[in-house]
Image (spheres, rainbow, N blue to C red):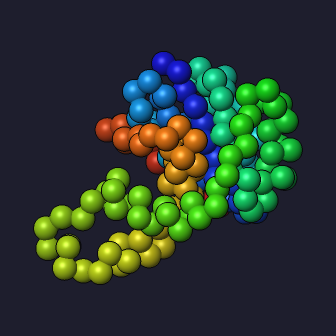
């Protein structure tokens, strides 16, 4: 399997997804503190066959790109304009509302949701001009404390 990482960088937290490019599936969708980004990517590269790492060019991207200097040859910087805003819509594509829940305003379901991992997915989807699906055993973690 050929895997890619996509990162939505931020000053305090980053969204990160690990995808298989051939299967078009997301295997990890996590949020971690920006200070853990370098260590997490290093560890992930030791256990996964990662060919490229994509990172958005928005908030605090310069600082986060510097943290990833060790993978410079495999790092691709991408446009990320409006990805966090678009993540709200993509959330409902990935997690559709059904049944009586359709009667409740959609915004209610994303209150306090951390959409950074979905923004990271959008960065990659924009670059690949394709959409990815979620693996049934999707690993979703949040390391913010």
Could you tell me residue 123's position as x and y percent?
A: 58, 49
Classify 37 as above or below 82: above
Report the front residue among 14 and 78: 78
Q: Quadrant of residue 12?
A: bottom right
* 18 left or right, relative to 100: right
The residue nearer to you, when weighing 140 against 87, is 87
The reply to whether residue 142 is in sight is no
Write the residue at 41% across / 71% down.
110
In the rendered picture of this protein, how many numbered marks are placed on residues? 0
Residue 122 image position (x, y, % from top left): 52, 51
Please name the residue shown 84% across and 53% down the image: 63
Q: Residue furthest left?
A: 99
Left or right: where 76 falls relative to 115:
right
Question: What is the residue that sits farthest to the front in this orientation?
Answer: 129
Q: Residue at x 79, y 26 (%)?
A: 73
> Would you say 103 lies left or right of 58 here?
left
Where does the image place residue 24, in percent across and percent down from the top left?
Answer: 41, 32
Task: Determine the residue positioned at 34% across, 62% down.
Answer: 92
- Asked whether residue 56 is in view, the answer is yes
Quadrant of residue 100 within the rendered picture = bottom left
**Left or right: where 7 falls relative to 19:** right
* Residue 21 percent location from the top left of the image: 48, 28
Of 39 and 20, nearer the camera is 20
Pick the quarter of the image with the C terminus.
bottom right
């Amino acid at each position: 399997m050929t895997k890619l990482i996509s990162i939505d960088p931020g000053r305090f937290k980053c969204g990160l997804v690990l995808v298989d490019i051939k299967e078009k599936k997301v295997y990890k969708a996590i949020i971690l503190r920006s200070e853990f980004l370098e260590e997490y990517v290093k560890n992930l590269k030791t256990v996964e066959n990662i060919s490229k790492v994509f990172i958005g060019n928005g908030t605090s991207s310069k600082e986060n790109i510097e943290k990833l200097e060790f993978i410079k040859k495999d790092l691709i910087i991408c446009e990320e304009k409006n990805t966090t805003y678009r993540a709200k819509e993509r959330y409902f594509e990935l997690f559709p509302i059904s049944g009586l829940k359709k009667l409740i305003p959609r915004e209610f379901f994303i209150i306090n949701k951390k959409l950074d991992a979905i923004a990271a997915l959008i960065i990659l989807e924009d670059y690949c001009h394709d959409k990815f699906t979620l693996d049934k055993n999707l690993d979703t973690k949040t390391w913010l404390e």
